[in-house]
Image (cartoon, grey):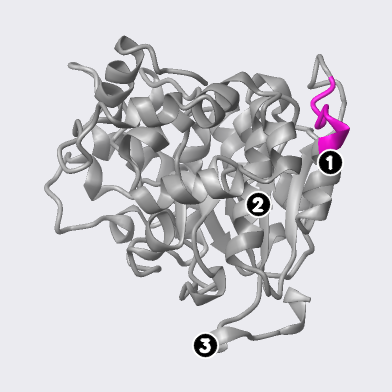
Amino acid sequence: MAGDGVTSREGHRAFNVMIVAQAGRLQYEAVLFAASFARSNPDFPGRLFVAEPQPGPLWPEDPRISDPRIRSLLTELGAEILPFESRAFGAAYPQGNKIEALLALPEGEPFLFLDTDTLVLDDLMAVPFDFDRPSASLRREGTWPKIELYGPGYTEIWRALYDRFGLDFERSLDLTQPDEHWRRYLYYNAGFFYFRCPRIFGERFLRYATEIRDDPPQALVCQSLDPWLDQVALPLVIHALGGGYGALEEGWMDGRTTCHYRLLPLLYARESDAVVDLLEEIAAPNPIKKVLKGYEPFLHMIYHGRGRKARALFDRDDLPRKEANLRNQLRKAGYWER
């Protein structure tokens, strides 16, 4: 077990991996994730959990994985279905699943959370995680806050958040970046994050996120928190628990070891040949193909060849700088499926 202090290849500490799946797109993405994980990590010493929200008052419809074939396939691929209760977010903010699911993981065992729309390309045990210094994905753009002409700037907004929770704002800054540039301030994509204990991380994440949602500082008056709430709270959690920029050497995650593709049209348009080849390899076996064909975007993009056609429209060495522009080009060409 990961909590027993097990070490493995290169002496790295074992840990558990968690994704979230539920009815709809995420259950199909979970199959691709688990298939890529099994292929790239056949001797993984930890456990792979697929966290699943349970029915309750915050879900108007049953959120659980709806296809029994998917449940069976995930188990065959080595995953454990992990039920959890939604007490703070639910259908109103499904991104909150990644926060509440942490509290269902084995306490005291290091964990790595990954968004379900991720492929595992290589051995996760080779990644030099320091689970005492949390970090998260740097594959992001300056999506929050949106600075209004006469409203508060980056410094005022982020300082208000750090002050709310008694955190040292000045220590969080990247002083190599200019004042009022978004990169100066801790900001992550919540596509992955990790720490030595999911209970400690999850309780802190839940407290910060719900307080920001329910009683935001005055400096956030012009800001939308949907869908950004998790990415607003996450830097505060990481900073509070001793992490920050530089805690993980760049190039491992969102690089040689994982690919957070977001949506298949984006994967085909911008990712490497190796990622596309891996996707199509793991999607080819009949048991997986039979399940994934039940989701139309996967049917069209992978099995009907629309992904390869979309890919041919783009030069990977000269892609649009902003993801929004890439999405618009895919949409204009008729290849935007989600």
Which image quadrant for residue 2?
bottom right
**Label drawn at residue 35:** 2
Q: Which part of the image, by quadrant, shows the N terminus? A: bottom right
Q: Residue furthest bottom?
A: 11
Point out the frontmost of discs 1 and 3. 1
Q: Residue at x 77, y 65 (%)?
A: 107
Secondary-structure class at tag 2: helix
**Which residue is most to the left?**
178
Name the disc covering residue 114, or none.
Answer: none
- Horizontal relation, residue 268 to residue 227: left or right: left
Q: From where the camera sits, is residue 19 visible?
A: yes
Residue 217 visible (yes or no): no
In the image, what residue occupies the spot 78% across and 47% down?
Answer: 74
Q: Position of residue 296 (x, y in %)?
A: 61, 19
Which one is closest to the eye, mark 2 or mark 3? 2
Relative height, residue 32 to residue 294 (above, below): below
Residue at the image point whose x is 60% and y is 49% from the top: 282
Question: Mark 2 or 1 closer to N-term?
Answer: 2
The residue beneath circle 3 is 10
The residue that mark 1 highlights is 71
